[in-house]
């Protein structure tokens, strides 16, 4: 029985799917920027933008999933392209998870600004957010450019985010002994900081997919 599936000639289609995945990453980065900007300047328009753009991100993931399904049904895939499709699906899902996390964090940030005009740990929180944003931006770049070296660099720097969070958490615990009245605002600082750190865990997943989807000798050697 002849195979009626088309030979692998759909590079343009795959490139289009990758471009949409890159767009999803850019939206996720913008969401995180909006959240950090809100913490810095307390412009409520940023929170409204987060909700709107997160809906776009969710819709884009649905489109990417549908496109991947159509692509696999239409073309005979090589092992490399199969890995790439799987990676696209996982990376797209990671971006969507980040978007949902940021939208949920936005409501906590809004509460924080309502109960505390200025917290001495806010600068450290924003610094942690900026570090997470850099890792997210580089994760998207690593996936888009299939840059294994950058992917390993991001993974190596994730521990720095964990250390920054641990340092902030320890300082919050110490301060609570003397500032029991500020327990609520410090609690929100801690929660938001933890969610910034969680974003870097999704960055790890994205970069691991860069390594997984590559069949180069460099990646295989490093994995071994």
Image (cartoon, grey):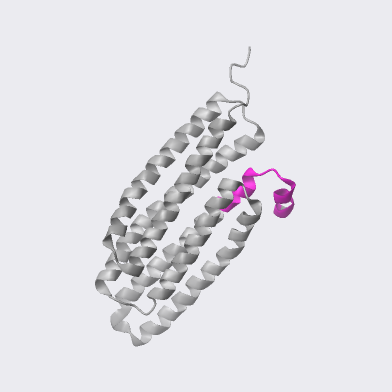
Q: Going 41% across and 41% down the picture, which residue do you hit?
A: 60
User: Main structural element of the magenta stretch: helix, strand or loop?
Assistant: helix
Q: Quadrant of the N terminus?
A: top right
Q: Going 31% across and 49% down the picture, which residue do you hit?
A: 52
Question: How far from the left and from the top, in percent, is residue 40?
Answer: 35, 69
34 is higher (above) or lower (below) than 74: below
78 is higher (above) or lower (below) than 169: above
Q: Going 58% across and 64% down the picture, which residue do you hit?
A: 157
Residue at the farthest top position = 1
How many badges with numbers are in the image?
0
Question: How far from the left and from the top, in percent, is residue 13?
Answer: 54, 31
Question: How far from the left and from the top, in percent, is residue 17?
Answer: 51, 37
Magenta region includes residue 209: yes
Question: Residue 23 or 224: which is nearer the viewer?
Answer: 23
Q: Going 59% across and 16% down the picture, which residue do you hit?
A: 4
User: Does the rendering let one see residue 201?
Assistant: no
Q: Which residues are magenta?
A: 206-223
Q: Name the side, left or right, on which 45 lies relative to 19.
A: left
User: Does the rendering let one see residue 111?
Assistant: yes
Question: How far from the left and from the top, in percent, is residue 28?
Answer: 43, 52
Magenta region includes residue 192: no
Residue at the farthest left position = 114
């Amino acid at each position: 029985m002849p195979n009626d599936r088309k030979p692998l000639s759909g590079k343009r289609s795959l490139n289009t799917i990758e471009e949409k995945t890159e767009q999803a990453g850019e939206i996720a980065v913008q969401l995180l920027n909006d959240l950090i900007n809100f913490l810095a300047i307390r412009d409520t328009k940023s929170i409204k933008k987060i909700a709107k753009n997160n809906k776009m991100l969710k819709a884009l993931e649905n489109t990417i999933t549908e496109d991947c399904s159509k692509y696999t049904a239409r073309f005979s895939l090589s092992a490399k392209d199969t890995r790439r499709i799987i990676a696209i699906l996982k990376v797209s899902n990671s971006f969507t998870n980040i978007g949902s996390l940021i939208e949920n964090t936005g409501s906590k940030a809004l509460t924080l600004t309502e109960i505390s005009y200025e917290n001495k740990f806010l600068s450290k929180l924003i610094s942690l957010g900026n570090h997470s944003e850099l890792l997210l931006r580089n994760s998207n770049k690593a996936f888009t450019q299939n840059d294994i070296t950058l992917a390993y660099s991001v993974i190596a720097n994730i521990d720095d985010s964990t250390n920054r969070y641990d340092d902030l958490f320890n300082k919050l615990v110490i301060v609570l002994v003397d500032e029991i009245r500020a327990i609520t605002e410090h609690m929100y600082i801690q929660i938001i900081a933890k969610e910034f750190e969680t974003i870097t865990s999704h960055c790890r997943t994205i970069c691991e997919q860069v390594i997984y989807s590559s069949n180069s000798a460099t990646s295989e050697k490093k994995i071994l």
